[in-house]
Image: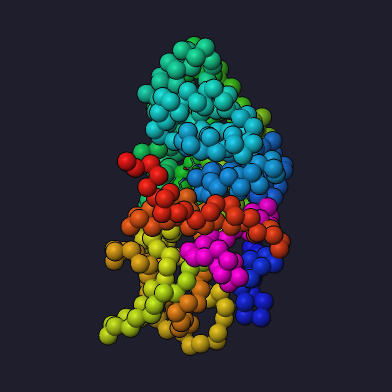
Amino acid sequence: MHHFEFRDGTLFAEEIAVNELADTYGTPLYVYSAATFKRHFEAFDSAFDGLEHMTCYSVKANSNLSVLKLLASMGAGMDIVSGGELYRALKAGVSPEKIVYSGVGKSANEIREALAADILMFNVESLAELEKINDIAEQEGKVARVSFRINPDVDPKTHPYISTGMKKNKFGLDMEHSLKAYSRAVELPAIEPIGMDCHIGSQLTSIEPFLEALDKLLNFNEKLKGMGIEIKYLDLGGGLGITYDEEEPPHPKAFGEALTEKLKDLPMTVILEPGRVIAGNAGIMVTEVLYTKETPSKSFVIVDGAMNDLVRPSLYDSFHRIGEAEQHGRDERDVDVVGPICESGDFLARDRQLPWVHQGERLVCYSAGAYGFTMSSNYNSRRRACELIVDGDKVTVARKRESYEDLIANEL
Ligand code: LLP
């Protein structure tokens, strides 16, 4: 459910016409709906009301400071994967005891910064990382709270690039190494193991893989108990999918109910790290038609938004619904929607049935609120887009469009 709706053929973001926003702020343009963010966060968080829990929004999905502030004001914790994300989360006012730090390659500096901030815990992904965190914590005179990211070897049935919980993936520790890690953790002077963690993948459209992973973790917990290790936090990661096209992922309520059923008697705080399900359908990318071009084999709609602005179609062959910002009732044609970048892989859609659009009109890419702007780049020396947050009839420039000066600001 989101707040991008047509009224008499004109697309509105909450109370403002998308075309008006494009006239004022230019294109390509990201537009986020505050009401949608709030609604998604509430729906997700309240689905776990039956459990002692913490919803730690996954910053990588959409890390705009205004978005983080909005979510922090609703009580969200944050899941971070870099020093930069820690910096953003703290700037947004998230309290450190609601921050968990995931990722296979935390650098010494990043570990030091997270210890200084006194975050809730590190989700540790290797024995070598454990030793490193212990060394640094010792030097700093601190004790690092950790959980281990357990790789349960479950197939999440999603795109291979965003599957993380299978044996062949670089993430986490298999069951055997996880046991070794906990035994080692209790020996280390500057480590306190307080949690268990897993994240099996992203854009999951069924509950079964989550439950399968959960069962494996609960079995594993029995082994830990046998070793005298009491775990206080169970972090189940993120991964709940959204509707881009025809997918029918479980509603957060059903997801919450299924997990609550299994976890209600467990004396642990459950941590969830949703990203896409909060941000994905809370944002659109608006782009202007520069040219149309017909060749003997294809019709192209050339727009000013490109793979540097929204890379998901090029990188994962992902589907983003595309439509007009203003409906004209024209006949549909089979088109490729492509950007100005010098790569054949620069497309937003291929072989898509779309009403034939004219130069200067705007198209909207839906479901662009997650992994849209955060994965954007300056490729082809293109300035990164402007990000707006619409809240009712109020617009905030959450990030202004980069200037040419910004492009070279850090160069000699
Ligand atoms: N927790 C951890 C440890 C993660 O690695 C991720 C995502 C999440 C939580 C949030 O997952 P979500 O709820 O958003 O599915 N760029 C890709 C997605 C990469 C996801 C990486 N990890 C895409 O555009 O589809």
Residue at horizontal 64 percent and vertical 75 percent from the top: 6
Q: Is residue 254 above or below residue 195?
A: below
* Quadrant in which the C terminus is drawn: top left
Closer to the camera in the image, 190 or 288? 288
Closer to the camera in the image, 122 or 349? 349
Say if residue 273 shows up in the picture.
Answer: yes
Q: Is residue 121 above or below residue 190?
A: below
- Residue 118 percent location from the top left of the image: 58, 24
Residue at horizontal 65 percent and vertical 59 percent from the top: 395
> What kind of colouring is applied to the model shown?
rainbow
Residue at horizontal 38 percent and vertical 80 percent from the top: 292
Q: Is residue 386 above or below residue 132?
A: below
- Residue 56 percent location from the top left of the image: 60, 40
Residue 127 lies in quadrant: top left
- Residue 191 percent location from the top left of the image: 50, 17
Say if residue 234 shows up in the picture.
Answer: no
| Magenta highlight range | 19-39
Residue at horizontal 56 percent and vertical 70 percent from the top: 23
Residue 353 lies in quadrant: bottom left
Q: Is residue 257 above or below residue 344?
A: above
Is 35 situated left or right of 198 in this image? right
**Within the magenta stretch, is there residue 208?**
no
* Quadrant in which the N terminus is drawn: bottom right
Question: So how many labels did they put on this image?
Answer: 0
Is 256 situated left or right of 245 in this image? right
